[in-house]
Image (cartoon, rainbow, N blue to C red):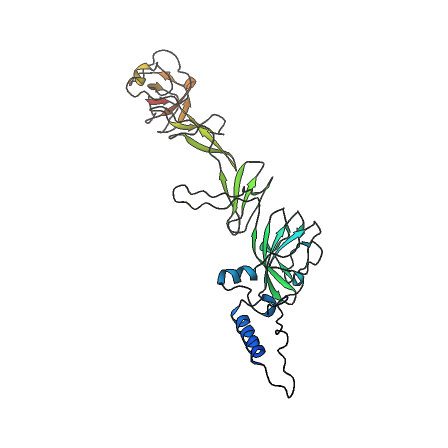
Amino acid sequence: MPRAGGVYSAPPGTKGTPNTPIESAKYNALVDDLVGDANAARPVTAGGSGSSTAVGAADNFNAAGADMASAATVNLANTTGTLVNITGTVPITALGTLAAGAERDLVFAASLTFTHNATSLILPGAANITTAAGDVARMRSLGGGNWKCVGYQRAAVAPLSNTFASPTITTPTLTLKQSAAPTPTAEGDVQWDTDDDVLVVGDGAAQKIFAALPAGTVAGDVLYLTSAKALARLAKGTALQMLRMNAGATAPEWSPALDYAGGAAALSTGAVGTYAFLKTNTILNPGDTIAGSSCLYSNSGGVTVGGAPAGTWRCMGYSVNPHVTLFLRIS
């Protein structure tokens, strides 16, 4: 006799009557019915799987249940299946009590707040989740009314592609912590300085600054700091130029190119960088300087010719009586 709602009932007329012979037809009918029931798929309500195959049994054990409305406590002990659609937008703070190890897959139909609790509702990142329509959460009971989210799939996030021909990973946008004057100290803490447009990275005690290269930088350029956090670019010079500090002592610059082949020939008498025999009225040692106005052009014997040179000169020998030696004009 077929089961009704999973409950077995013996065929009619199979019960015996005291002091009455057992009829073979009724007895055999009962035996055949019991054999048939024993070999048939036992319903889930009777402790079976409801199927004669492993796949069918797994499907029956993971059936979709009726929808449940969101509430402060959505009691998953009352679900009619392991896959449950959660409707509504009321924040959820508890999921009821089920034996430890029981799992439920929740599919959210709308946006609501899934509230983290370190004991009773443990969510990824130890933070609340704002759901979206189509999001799926797999919840595992820890017993005693406590639950842990062991998986959360956003409906709006594309799955990963792992094809060797064209590997593609879709990731969310990364936004750094930022402020006008960040001072991270934790090792590896990276922040963006919005005032100076530099990366500031904590090294465990202080900060390391990483500044961007100036626009147009090419090989051979010279980089220098215009402040504690700003790089500037000095374009590479030409052949025979020398690097020097500018007149304001604020930045490097290139000097005019030195022409060793024809430069000396192009210098006029008394120009910066030229040498001359000069006569002075004082004793000078090598390295001493003197104003040109205190000197006269001279020969080695002390005979002066012409007037006083301009500029400042450095003594290259000893200026003793007759106070004549070689001088270099330095400015």
Instruction: Give how far across and how far down residue 207 sits, in percent.
Output: 52, 46
On screen, residue 53 versus residue 300, left or right, reads: right
Tell me if residue 323 can be seen.
no
Q: Is residue 53 above or below residue 172?
A: below
- Total labels: the figure holds 0
> Closest to the observer: 232 or 287?
232
Instruction: Give how far across and how far down residue 74 sits, in percent.
Output: 68, 58
In the picture, the quarter occupied by the C terminus is top left
Q: Is residue 248 above or below residue 45?
A: above
On screen, residue 315 versus residue 250, left or right, reads: left
Q: Residue at x 43, y 17 (%)?
A: 293
Instruction: Give how far across and how far down residue 120 sits, in percent.
Output: 65, 62
> Closest to the observer: 51 or 306?
51
In the figure, residue 264 lies in which quadrant? top left
In the figure, residue 179 lies in which quadrant? top right
Q: Is residue 80 above or below residue 14?
A: above
> Closest to the observer: 317 or 143?
143
Q: Residue at x 63, y 50 (%)?
A: 108
Q: Residue at x 49, y 60 (%)?
A: 55
On screen, residue 135 versus residue 304, left or right, reads: right
Instruction: Give how far across and how far down residue 171 sits, in percent.
Output: 51, 43
In the picture, the quarter occupied by the N terminus is bottom right
The residue furthest top is 306
On screen, residue 325 versus residue 41, left or right, reads: left
In the figure, residue 45 lies in which quadrant? bottom right
Tell me if residue 261 can be seen.
yes
